[in-house]
Image: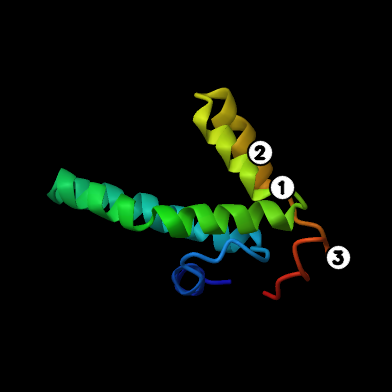
Amino acid sequence: MSFSDAIKICFQKYMDFNGRAKRPEFWWFALFCVLVSVGLSIVSSALSSLFSLATLLPSLAVGARRLHDTNRSGWLQLIWIIPVIGWIIMIVLLAQQGSSEDNQYGSTPAN
């Protein structure tokens, strides 16, 4: 999956918390959000904040779909609330390889 494909899919599934997302889809979208936010913060803090607010729902949705791919509930994203330790745990969970067969959250995504 390419960088542009991942961004396109994440915006098409803006509020879709169902299904599964492979690692490239999640990590390319995360990179896109960080790069654009940093770029906009150079121009204006308000623009960066507005962009972050606009991408909050798609970021949560792709995070939930990514956790679904590892056969975990999307509600585990609440671990982000715990400083440092929660962040480390979430990065590890999101970086793990997804299950290769169908699970309760849907069939294996193609890419």
Residues marked 3 and 2 touching at CB (< 8 Å): no
Q: Position of residue 55 (x, y in %)?
A: 37, 57
> Left of 37 or right of it: where is 13?
right
Q: Position of residue 44 (x, y in %)?
A: 13, 48
Residues marked 1 and 2 touching at CB (< 8 Å): yes
> Left of 58 or right of it: where is 43?
left
Nearest the camera: 98 or 55? Answer: 55
Res. 96 mark: 1
* Amino acid type, label 2: Val
* Amino acid type, label 3: Glu
Q: CA distance from mark 3 to mark 2?
A: 21 Å
In the depicted structure, whether residue 5 falls above or below residue 54: below
At a point 28% along the width and 55% down the height, the residue shown is 51
> Left of 3 or right of it: where is 47?
left
Q: Position of residue 85 (x, y in %)?
A: 58, 24
The part of the image, by quadrant, that contains residue 68 is bottom right
Mark count: 3
Query: Dot 2: within a 10 Å radius of its alpha carbon, few (fewer than 14), some, or many (20 or more) residues?
Result: few
Q: Is residue 27 visible?
A: no
Res. 101 mark: 3
> Left of 42 or right of it: where is 86?
right
Q: Residue furthest right?
A: 101
| Quadrant of the drawing holding the N terminus | bottom right
Residues marked 1 and 3 touching at CB (< 8 Å): no
Q: Earlier in the sequence, mark 1 or mark 3?
A: 1
Nearest the camera: 59 or 24? Answer: 59
Q: Secondary structure at mark 3?
A: loop
Q: CA distance from mark 1 to mark 2?
A: 6 Å
Camera-side mark, 1 or 3? 3
Nearest the camera: 39 or 78? Answer: 78
Query: Dot 3: within a 10 Å radius of its alpha carbon, few (fewer than 14), some, or many (20 or more) residues?
Result: few
